[in-house]
Image (tube, rainbow, N blue to C red):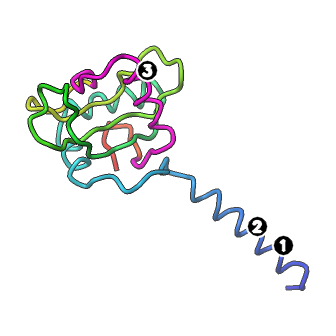
Amino acid sequence: MSRRAAPATAIAAAALGFLGAGCGGSSGPEPPERCIAEWNADEIAKTLGKHAYDGHEIRSAKVEEIEAPPGAENIRSERTCLVVFAVAEGDKEEGRLGLVVTRFGWSQLFELGYSDAKLLELQRSAHGGTNAELFPDGSLE
């Protein structure tokens, strides 16, 4: 390999590595394993995942454990799992594509007790912090 080829090869490899780092829809911290396991074990949750994948062409989500908001009457523990999909802005279901664990199991985002504006903000925040890949069967990894 010539001296000129070596830098070009290094630059190409670095560019491919940089591009590869963005694959898989992960830009946030590791998702809590407990939340991923609970999601994947629940058919209702996976049904919403399938809907998000097929109906909205979503491929990633923000999965986190949050403190229960004061207005969330059906969240009995201090902390709970939250899954919010990275939906396109203006989507007809924006502000509603996600689930939170309540005393009834996985439930709709309105259980958080947030206003519609706050739910939209929550949904939009998923774009900058996705940390889980969504699969066609509705499961997360």
Mark sitting on residue 12: 2
Residue at the spot 44% in from the left edge and 27% down from the top edge: 121
Which of labels 1 and 3 is toward the front? 3
Mark sitting on residue 88: none
Q: Considering depth in this image, is 115 or 63 the residue closer to the camera?
A: 115
Badge 1: few (under 14), some or many (20 or more) residues near its Cα, within 10 Å?
Answer: few
Residue 97: image quadrant is top left
* Amino acid marked by disc 3: Glu
Looking at the rendered structure, the secondary structure element under dot 3 is: loop
Residue 32 higher or lower than 4, as above or below: above
The quarter of the picture where the N terminus appears is: bottom right
Residue under numbered circle 3: 94
Looking at the rendered structure, the secondary structure element under dot 1 is: helix
Residue under numbered circle 1: 8
Helix, strand or loop for the magenta stretch, by majority: helix
Residue 81: image quadrant is top left
* Amino acid marked by disc 1: Ala
Q: Could you say where residue 85 lies in the image, as x and y percent from the top left?
A: 40, 34
Residue 124 in the magenta stretch? The answer is yes
Who comes first in sequence, dot 2 or dot 3? 2
Q: Could you say where residue 38 lies in the image, as x and y percent from the top left?
A: 18, 45
Real-space Cα separation, disc 2 to disc 3, in angstroms: 38 Å
* Amino acid marked by disc 2: Ala
Q: Do labels 2 and 1 touch, CB within 8 Å?
A: yes
Residue 79 higher or lower than 109, as above or below: below
Real-space Cα separation, disc 2 to disc 1, in angstroms: 6 Å
Farthest top residue? 92
Which of labels 2 and 3 is toward the front? 3
Looking at the rendered structure, the secondary structure element under dot 2 is: helix
Which span of residues is magenta-colored? 109-132
